[in-house]
Image: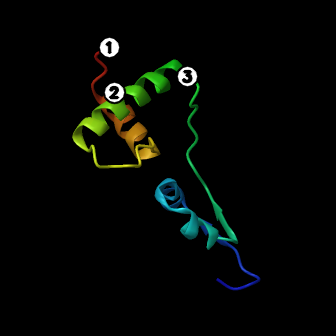
């Protein structure tokens, strides 16, 4: 990237930054990104996060990154929007 330039990245790229390591992020000076926002303080989110981590670690015990990303939340929302059986 040039000294006098700025890149604007979309939600699809920005959401993957959660999975990047520090050396990758440090090379991203001059980048502006747009992200989806979700509140992490709601009871519904906390319950989903707990269930997600438990199930994920059972299926992938070797994985070290268990951070809940926007894609998991969007998938969860899509399933409940399609089949709301609560």
Which quadrant holds residue 40?
top right
At 31% across and 20% down in the image, what residue appears? Answer: 84
For marks 3 and 1, the one nearer the N-term is 3
Neighbour class for label 3 at 10 Å: few (<14), some, many (≥20)? few
Q: Is residue 54 above or below residue 1?
A: above
Quarter of the rendering occupied by the N terminus = bottom right
Residue visible at 28% across and 33% down in the picture: 55
Secondary structure of residue under mark 3: loop
Q: Residue at x 56, y 36 (%)?
A: 38
**68 or 32, which is in the foreground?**
68
Residue with the mark numbered 3: 42
The answer to which of marks 1 and 2 sits earlier in the sequence is 2
Relative side of 46 to 77, left or right: right
N-terminal of the two: label 2 or label 3?
A: 3
Q: Assign a secondary structure to mark 2.
A: helix
What numbered label is drawn on residue 57?
none
Left of 42 or right of it: where is 56?
left
Q: So how many labels did they put on this image?
A: 3
Query: Residue 47 location in percent, x, y?
Result: 43, 22
Name the spot of residue 33 as percent of width and height, x first.
62, 60
Report how far apart the C-alphas of labels 2 and 3 lie in the structure: 17 Å
Q: Nearer the viewer, mark 3 or mark 1?
A: 3
Question: What residue is disc 2 on?
Answer: 80
**Residue 48 lies in quadrant:** top left
- Left or right of 56, for residue 30: right
User: Distance between the Cα atoms at labels 1 and 2?
Assistant: 9 Å
For residue 86, the mark is 1
Asked if labels 2 and 1 touch by Cβ distance under 8 angstroms, the answer is yes
Crowd tier of the residue under label 2, counting other residues whose Cα lies within 10 Å: few below 14, some 14–19, many 20 or above: few
């Amino acid at each position: 990237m040039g000294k006098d330039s700025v890149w604007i990245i979309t939600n699809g790229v920005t959401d993957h930054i959660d999975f990047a390591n520090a050396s990758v992020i440090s090379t991203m000076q001059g980048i502006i990104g747009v992200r989806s926002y979700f509140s992490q303080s709601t009871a519904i989110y906390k319950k989903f996060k707990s269930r997600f981590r438990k199930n994920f670690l059972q299926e992938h015990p070797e994985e070290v990154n268990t951070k809940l990303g926007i894609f998991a939340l969007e998938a969860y929302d899509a399933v409940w929007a399609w089949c709301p059986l609560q």
